[in-house]
Structures are given as structure tokens and as C-alpha cells.
Amino acid sequence: MSYQVLARKYRPRTFADVIGQDHIVKALSRALEKDRIGQAYLLIGPRGTGKTSTARILAKSLNCEKGESVAPCLACGPCLEIESGADMDVVEIDGASNNGVDDVRDLREKVHFRPMRDRRKVYIIDEIQRLTGPAFDALLKTLEEPPDHVIFLFATTDPHKIPDTIVSRCQTFEFRRLREDDILNKLLDICQKEGVEVSEDVLGAISRGCRGGLRDAESMLDQLLAVTEGVPTLEELEMVAGLARPECWQILLEAVSNQDGAQILKSVDAFLQRGGTERDFVEQLVDALRDLLHVALLGEDVLGVVPSADRQQRMVKLAGALGQDRLETLMGMFFSLESRMNQSPLSARALLEWTLLRASRLGDLLETTTLLQNLRSGTLTATSVSAEPPAPVKKPEPVRASAPTLPSPPTSPTPPTPSPSATSIQDLLKEVRERRPSLGRVLTDYLVEGTLHEDRVEVVLQPLEDRSRRMVEDPIESRFLKELPSSPGPWTIRYFEKVQRHDPLGEQLKSSFEGVEEVP
Ligand SMILES: [Zn+2]
């Protein structure tokens, strides 16, 4: 038996097999049960989401020999022939083919004849937006007075290119992109039925890479199985599908958030090594930033794909760490980077690396600006006892607020929780010394008293000379301390001689700044 591609072999044969389009399946099933099937349907949606499969299933439901049914028998003449595309009364026309006009003209002539065998004559026109003007005109004439025995099923990826006169005569159904989890489950099922072993990592990467199109996911799996011997790896998938490892943007943006310059340079290098250009990099990075914003705000990415729960959590956490202000600024930086690259293509890589490294310092820059504004407006004095940077003047909108008309994310995103706290102040200071030697040395050498609270750190130091003091009070360092993996929260640094139990200004500052997070 010849090999059948997976997308074809596992194409849905009944409404029960159609995944991720419950709203459409329900509506069509109800119409069938109540015998209220319309005369023309317009099925809208991205490629590979089940439009033509659904059209064929409906054709079977209407023409099955066992009678009109939501669950056609799949064994009678009409059922089998519709599946193989051989039924004389179910005509499929490809709007993208050259003979679209001829086909529609032919349709106009034959549409009035009774079906040869089946109860209904069904015309399925795929990619209907590709028909030419004359073909649309011919079609419209038929649609204006359709014979009772005829049903039209139009499928399109781009409804805006269809004349209103046609659209207004159709009932419209919108197919959604599939959820990552639904695609993953389907791929797992296929692998099991095929008796092939593919790791969930690889299948997960495919379900992310196909962006909600099941057919694309199945084709990727096909290609992968065709070229690999043994169990396919992520590297092989990368080669076959040209898919950058989906985690790579997350890793890069986390490096930007953590000011991890080495990782940033590594990410750029890895991407270019794989044969991508600097422009590709910027384009895909901007997409990744948009996805991050969309997932954080709406629970689904730019295209409307709902990511798997753990990926969503990771994205929400990253978006929270970066903050909406910084995300928007980053997008702006990369937009202007594109045009700069065009002006000096030879230094594209250097420009890219420089922009990314600068982007990683953006949090500091934004905070310094705020600090300066606050100093000028007098809300903070230079001798403030708090080392925690002041709250931003304009508090950014909460990143995870969801718009009222949109469904909220399936898992309630939690704000980033600090990693398990250090057990003692000494552990914490050790961590500081490892990452910022000079700061760590000052904090250790001048420490009088340190207290580790559940949500903050209080440190009392001996008086410092100006230079050390400037370093300790630098907002960049404050932020660094607060964001140390083992730090429970912001650090308050006081000086031994100035500690006053009832310092009204100090208390006031403390209560206004403590617990204020840049982003909820
Ligand atoms: Zn049947």
C-alpha cells in the first residue's frame, strides 16, 4: 500500500473528530437535527484548521444513504465517494486554480439539474477569494435564486477579498486557530497509532511552531519522520522544519531581563550560525515581543493561539519582570534598528548586539530617569535612607489585566514569586559577593546588622565613604539586590549612626516605597 501523508490519513471523518471548533460543530449539528440547513455557508479561517474537512463531513451528513444524520455511516456509497472526492453530486472547485471561471460557468449551467444519486447537490469552493470578477458575477447569479436541492460551502482564508454581495448571502462560520495543547494531543495520538516514537519535547515544539494550524503540524511531523533514523531530536526538527527552537526567544528575552550579556551574545551567535540573517532575527524578535504582550494581556498570542499552561506561565512571568513600559520601549528600539540596518548592512551584527545589550540595561535607564524626576520634584532627597528606588511616577498599567470582552487566560497567571529565600543574611551576602564583588565586599565589611524578613531585607551598615555610599545607594544596585534569586524583596539600607527608632520621614518613606513593585 502506498504511503499516505499523515494529514490525509488522519483527517477528521466525522464531526466528533473535528478538534478545536466546537462552536461550529455544535451549530451545524443543531441545524442538521432541526432540518434547518442553510443554502450557503462561508467557512472562514487560517489554513489547516479544518474548513474543507468540515465541508466534506457536512456533505456526508446530508447525503449518507442511511439518511440525514450528524453521524454519517462512513460506509455507504455516498460517504465513501465523498471522502475520496469521487461523488458526482458533490463538486469541489479550487478557487485558486486557473479554470475557476470555467468551473463556475459550468456550475451555473448544471446547478439546476437534479442530483444524479444523492439527495443534495453540494458545491464546495475552496479559496473562494481567489475567484476572478467574472466568476464572482456568475456565482452571484446562482446564489440569488438557488435551487432547493443545492448547497454551497465556501471556504476562505481571506474573507475581505470576497464581494459583500456574496458574503451577505451566506451564513458565516469562523474557524479558530487550534490551541497548542489540542495539537499536541492530536500528534501524540497519531504517533501512537503509527507506532512511532517521538518525544513530547519534539511534538511540543511542532505544536508551537505550527501556530495553530493542524495540517502544518502534521506535515512537519511527516517530514521529520521521513528524514530521521531512530527517535527524532529537536536539532533534527530545527533542520527539517527550519523552526528556530521555540524557546530561543524566551531565553533571549529572559537574558535581556536579567542583564545577562553573555547569554545575549550567545543567542545572537546561535541564530546566525543556523543561517538566519540579522534582519530575520529582528523580525522574529519583534514577533516574540508582541506575542509576549498579547499572552500577558489576553491569554493568547498575536494569532490567537492559546499557549500551553506552563509556557503561558513562563511568558506572563517574563512580561511581568520586563514591565509593559519596557516591552513597548523594546519594540520601538527594534523597529528603528531595522531601518538602521538597512542604512549600514555591513555592521548589522554589531548594531544588533549593541542594541540588545543596551536593551538589557533599559530597566536601569528607565529607573534612573524616574529617580531624576523625583529628585527634581522634591519627592525624594539625596540622603534618603532607603536604597530602594522610588516608585515610578506613572505606574505602568498592570500587564495582566484582561479586556472585559475577551476570555481571561485559562490559568490565572500569578505574579513572579521569588525563588526560595536564602536561609541567612550571610548566604545572601555571599551571593552578592559572587555576582557583584565590590558591592558584596562593602556590604559584608561594613555590616552592623542584617535582618532577613519574609518580603524584604534590612541592613544596617557602618558609615561609608562617599564612593562606597554612592555605589550602595545606586538605583541600579538596589534593583540588582532586590532581584537576586534568593532575595525575598527590596533592601533597605541604613547607617549605624543615623538609625533612629522614630524617624517620621524615614517611616514615611519606608511605608511609601516598600512593597511597591514596578509591575504587579
Ligand atoms: Zn453513509
Image: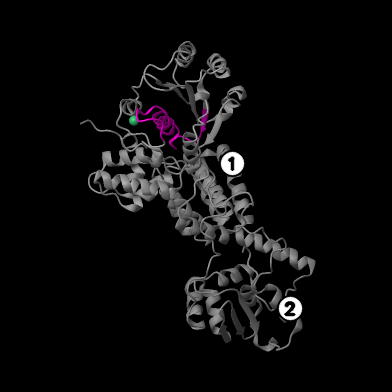
- Within the magenta stretch, is there residue 53? yes
Q: Nearer the viewer, residue 141 or 402?
A: 141
Q: Which residue is mark 1?
A: 340
Q: Is residue 402 left or right of residue 382?
A: left
Q: Residue furthest right?
A: 377
Residue 519 is situated, as x and y percent measured from the top left of the image, at 62, 63
Is ligand 1 closer than 8 angstroms to the Cβ of mark 2?
A: no
What's drawn in magenta, residue-wise? Answer: 41-69
- Quadrant of ligand 1 in image: top left
Q: Nearer the viewer, residue 200 or 74?
A: 74
Q: Which residue is mark 2?
A: 508
| Amino acid, disc 1 | Arg
Residue 459 is situated, as x and y percent measured from the top left of the image, at 60, 82
Q: Is residue 340 left or right of residue 193?
A: right
| Amino acid, disc 2 | Gln
Is ligand 1 closer than 8 angstroms to the Cβ of mark 1?
A: no
Residue 395 is situated, as x and y percent measured from the top left of the image, at 69, 61
Give the SS element for disc 2: helix
- Residue 505 vs 314, above or below: the answer is below
Q: Is residue 384 visible?
A: no
Residue at 65 percent of width and 60 percent of height: 366
Quarter of the rendering occupied by the C terminus:
bottom right
- Within the magenta stretch, is there residue 189? no
Q: Are marks 2 and 1 in contact (CB under 8 Å)?
A: no
Residue at 77 percent of width and 70 percent of height: 379
- Residue 195 vs 520, above or below: the answer is above
